[in-house]
Amino acid sequence: MRPGPPPSSEPPAGINPPSCLSPRGWFARRPIRVLAKRLYHAILTLPAGGKGVWRRAPGGEPVLLLPEFRYVSWVAAEYSQYKQAIQPGDVVFDIGANAGGYALLFGRWVQPGGRVFAFEPAPVAFRGLSRHVELNGL
């Protein structure tokens, strides 16, 4: 076998790579993706009057979430333990609250007279937590 030329990173002659793989193609599609995502989120929020997406906790409590956090979930075993332990008037600390899935429930369960202190160091999750508290009237 004869040695041939070294392999090239260029496509063979006559074959053009898809433009979407080029940096220019990626940037050209970005505005379309952003608009599509906004439209999708707007459609998701229609049932809640454009405010968010309704989800139900394991106990059936409705929780209003931002579309980008619609995958917030609760573990049924944790939920039942928390529900049993937290009483009206309690003070609850939620350290690492993320987007507030449990903090929102705690805020309802401690009423009247209780307080929830939810801490979240990640900026994106903290913004979600803050908006969720506002959306749910807590």
Image (cartoon, helix red, strand yellow):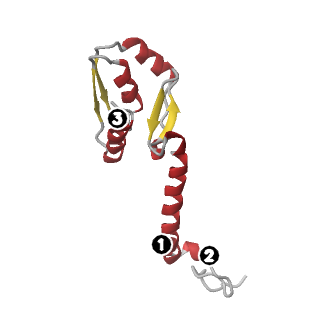
Q: Visible in this render: residue 8?
A: yes
Residue 133's disc number? 3
The picture quadrant where one finds residue 87 is: top left
Foreground residue among 37 and 71:
37
Foreground residue among 40 and 73:
40
How busy is the neighbourhood of tag 3: few (under 14 within 10 Å), some, or many (20 plus)? Answer: some
Residue 18's disc number? 2
Instruction: Indicate left or right for 63 with 47 as reference.
Output: left
Residue 113's disc number? none
Q: Position of residue 131 (x, y in %)?
A: 35, 41
Q: Position of residue 26 (x, y in %)?
A: 51, 71
Q: Is residue 39 above or below residue 135?
A: below
The picture quadrant where one finds residue 117 is: top left
> Going 33% across and 33% down the picture, which residue do you hit?
96
Instruction: Indicate left or right for 18 with 35 as reference.
Output: right
Mark closer to the chain start, 1 or 2: 2
Which part of the image, by quadrant, shows the C terminus?
A: top left
Foreground residue among 36 and 95:
36
Q: CA distance from mark 3 to mark 2?
A: 45 Å
Mark 1 or 2: the one toward you = 1
Badge 1 is on which residue? 27
Q: Secondary structure at mark 3?
A: helix
